[in-house]
Image (spheres, rainbow, N blue to C red):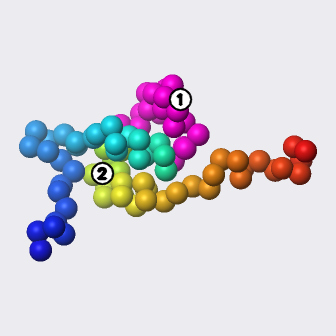
Amino acid sequence: MSYLLKQPPVDLFGSVAITEDDLWNWVASVSPVHLHERGFALYVARYDVAGKVAKAKLAGTFDALTARTPPPFHFRFDLHRIL
């Protein structure tokens, strides 16, 4: 069945196709704290997210990495110590 076939991560020119949605999905699954506009742009630039996405796509692990959802950021705080 043709709808089950996956497209290879490399396009006709030998480079990995990376979209803005790929970058957003990566940041949402790895560091959801940086999902606001300025934080997203800085995180993508400083941590070479495009390079990490390309490596993950070539290794075939991109879908597995972006499918997981980390715990919400506020769970990282120890509330009884803050209050």
Q: Main secondary structure of the magenta part?
A: helix
Quickly name the residue at label 1.
39
Judging by the rendered image, the residue that carries numbered circle 2 is: 57
Q: Which image quarter: residue 54? A: top left
Q: Which residue is pictured at 53% across the width and 29% down the height?
A: 39
Q: Secondary structure at mark 1?
A: helix
Q: Residues within 10 Å of mark 2 (few under 14, many from 20)?
A: some
The region drawn magenta spans 30-52
Residue 40: x %, y % from top left: 48, 32
| Magenta span contains residue 32 | yes
Q: Is residue 23 above or below residue 5?
A: above
Position in image of residue 30 (x %, y %): 51, 47
- Left or right relative to 13: residue 47: right
Q: How many marks?
A: 2
Q: Residue at x 41, y 41 (%)?
A: 24
Label whose residue precedes the other's in the sequence (2 or 1): 1
SS of the residue under disc 2: helix
Visible residue check, residue 43:
no
Q: Amino acid at mark 2?
A: Lys
Front residue of 2 and 59? 2
Q: Is residue 1 left or right of residue 60?
A: left
